[in-house]
Image (cartoon, rainbow, N blue to C red):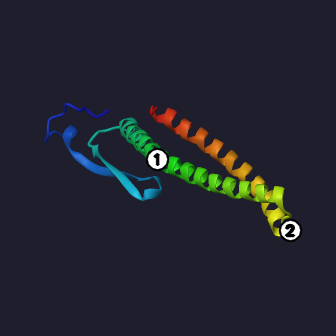
Amino acid sequence: MFDKKAKPGTPEGIVTGNFNLTATLGASGRTMQMAGYLYYGEDQESIEARVAMMRSIMEKEQTLAEIPELEAKREQMIKGMNQAREVLAELLDKQKTSSLSSQERMNIKNMQVNIAKVDEEIKKGDAAIQEKKQKVGVR
């Protein structure tokens, strides 16, 4: 095991190598990099413990970066769904007062199906956002 109190210049304090961990944070392309050193006489367990600690930090940062991206995607889906609902309402109003073309009737059916699908995707997105927030302790 590496002695953290080893004095520089003694064999136990000599750096024999280094390692880097890099993670991409979300779709933005931002990266995070962490470096560590290997010390003379250090055992594998000590190295693995430090790498695991760094990996845990990086995973948390990746999750934190994903949350705003998921929230933005959710907002776009809500906007699109609301626009589709407006168009659907116009078509349904038109249907009450006049006959619709076959294309308009098909649009009504397709829009109803698509709105239901988007609504389901929004619910899944909400669950994913909540799960990620819980994972990193964000409210």
**Side of 105 relative to 132 (left or right):** right
For image coordinates 28% across by 51% down, the residue present is 17
**Side of 71 relative to 101 (left or right):** left
Three-letter code, disc 2: Ser
The answer to whether 86 is drawn above or below residue 135 in the figure is: below
Crowding at mark 2 (Cα within 10 Å: few <14, some 14-19, many 20+): few
Name the outermost residue toward the front. 97
Residue 68 disc label: 1
Cα distance between the residues tagged 1 and 2 = 41 Å
**Side of 6 relative to 32 (left or right):** left
For image coordinates 51% across by 32% down, the residue present is 134
Q: Quadrant of residue 88?
A: bottom right
Q: Which percent across, then down, holds residue 77?
A: 60, 53
The answer to whether 108 is drawn above or below residue 62 in the figure is: below
Q: Which percent across, then down, holds residue 130?
A: 55, 36
Q: Quadrant of residue 14?
A: top left
For image coordinates 20% across by 40% down, the residue present is 13
Q: Quadrant of residue 58?
A: top left
Query: Which quadrant of the rendered structure holds the N terminus?
Result: top left
Residue 37 disc label: none
The answer to whether 95 is drawn above or below residue 123 in the figure is: below
Depth check: 106 or 64 in front?
A: 106
Q: Which percent across, then down, holds residue 103?
A: 82, 69
Residue 102 disc label: 2
Depth check: 14 or 75 in front?
A: 75
For image coordinates 86% across by 64% down, the residue present is 99
